[in-house]
């Protein structure tokens, strides 16, 4: 399958979880992948896995909350591969320190904004000029069901930060359409990454995950396969859309 043949993609946070699965699957569709992660071991492991399956990838060690590092990372990808077609902002995280608005600490509020919204903003800020120079491209941002539906899980800082990602995506879609730069977001429900599986023995986590997952919880490939569609020319008329991968949550 060559749905991304000839394309160059940056996937942030692809040293593990959903991002790694995306990197492996994008590479199988012919894309050259820049794996960006702040954890060196995970990022290098993803690159080795891509090379083992016959793909092309490089690792860039960068913290996506650091503007200079993000700018440099994107420049180095364009220097190496000659262009950028796809910016997939996946890096992000929720935290047990989050809470309802009257309890969450100021530090945790800003941490959530930095890790989820600022990372996506910086990725877009420095990738957009390259996508415009390329004559078009695809931005894929990572939101969450927490951005779309309320639930009694008390993660207000995370919800708000992912809500910001949704709004940023829509605003960008309108302004960059004339350059054929599309911007979409994916809003996953609980996805069973290695990290999430570890919480499964914790009844508090299970109670807090909330929602009605009519088809069960997701796997990283459920997000990665949608991301391939959004990255490819198959979705050339799709921009400004937020796609819930929510196991029927919104219908229930
Ligand atoms: N897993 C889920 O249930 C779920 C549900 C909804 C949304 N999401 C979102 O999907 C994305 C991926 O989640 P995951 O579950 O695969 O997480 P994960 O922890 O398994 O992987 C995240 C990766 O991002 C990297 N990372 C985090 N912050 C970074 C930064 N500042 N700079 C560079 N790299 C950074 C980590 O090192 C890690 O390799 C996140 O944005 C998360 O909020 C996940």
Image: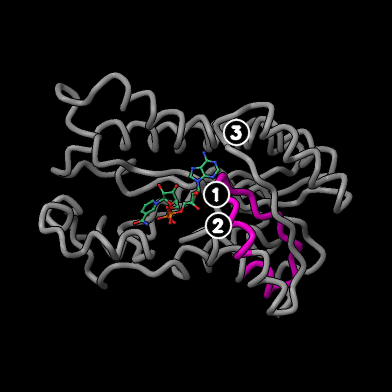
Give the distance between the C-alpha atoms of the residues marked 3 and 1, in whole angstroms: 29 Å
Give the distance between the C-alpha atoms of the residues marked 1 and 2, in whole angstroms: 7 Å
Q: Kindly identify which numbered label has been placed on residue 39.
A: 1
Is the residue 241 above or below the residue 121 in the image? Answer: below
Nearer mark to the viewer, of 2 and 3: 2
How would you rate the neighbour count of disc 2 (Cα within 10 Å): few for under 14, some for 14-19, many for 20 or more?
many
Judging by the rendered image, the residue that carries numbered circle 3 is: 172
Label 2 residue near ligand 1, CB within 8 Å:
yes
Question: From the viewer's perspective, is 235 left or right of 135?
Answer: left
Q: Residue at x 63, y 46 (%)?
A: 139
Judging by the rendered image, the residue that carries numbered circle 2 is: 15
Q: Secondary structure at mark 3?
A: helix
Nearer mark to the viewer, of 1 and 2: 1
Image coordinates of residue 34 in percent, x first then y, are: 71, 54
Q: Secondary structure at mark 1?
A: loop
Q: Mark 1 or mark 2: which comes first in sequence?
A: 2
Q: Which residues are magenta?
A: 25-46
- Is mark 1 in CB contact (under 8 Å) with mark 2? yes
Q: Residue at x 69, y 69 (%)?
A: 27
Q: Could you tell me how many numbered marks the image carries?
A: 3
How would you rate the neighbour count of disc 1 (Cα within 10 Å): few for under 14, some for 14-19, many for 20 or more?
some
Q: Mark 3 or mark 1: which comes first in sequence?
A: 1
Q: Residue at x 67, y 34 (%)?
A: 70
Choose between 39 and 194: the one closer to the eye. Answer: 39
Label 1 residue near ligand 1, CB within 8 Å:
yes
Give the distance between the C-alpha atoms of the residues marked 2 and 3, in whole angstroms: 27 Å
Is the residue 245 above or below the residue 161 in the image? Answer: below
């Amino acid at each position: 399958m060559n749905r991304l043949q000839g394309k160059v993609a940056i996937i942030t946070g692809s040293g593990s979880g959903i991002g790694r699965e995306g990197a492996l699957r994008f590479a199988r569709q012919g894309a050259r992948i820049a794996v960006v992660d702040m954890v060196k071991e995970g990022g290098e492991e993803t690159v080795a896995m891509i090379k083992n399956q016959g793909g092309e990838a490089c690792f860039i060690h960068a913290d996506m909350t650091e503007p200079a590092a993000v700018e440099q990372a994107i420049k180095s990808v364009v220097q190496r591969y000659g262009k950028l077609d796809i910016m997939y902002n996946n890096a992000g995280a929720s935290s047990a320190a989050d809470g309802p608005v009257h309890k969450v600490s100021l530090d945790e509020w800003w941490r959530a904004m930095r890790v989820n919204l600022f990372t996506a903003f910086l990725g877009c800020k420095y990738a957009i000029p390259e996508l415009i120079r390329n004559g078009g491209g695809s931005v894929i941002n990572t939101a969450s069901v927490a951005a779309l539906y309320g639930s009694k899980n008390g993660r207000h800082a995370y919800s708000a930060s992912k809500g910001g990602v949704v709004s940023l995506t829509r605003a960008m879609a309108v302004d960059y359409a004339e350059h054929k730069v599309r911007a979409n977001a994916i809003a996953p429900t609980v996805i069973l990454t290695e990290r999430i599986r570890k919480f499964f023995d914790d009844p508090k986590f299970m109670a807090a995950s909330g929602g009605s997952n009519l088809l069960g919880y997701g796997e990283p490939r459920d997000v990665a396969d949608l991301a391939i569609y959004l990255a490819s020319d198959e979705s050339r008329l799709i921009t400004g859309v937020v796609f819930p991968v929510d196991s029927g949550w919104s219908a229930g």
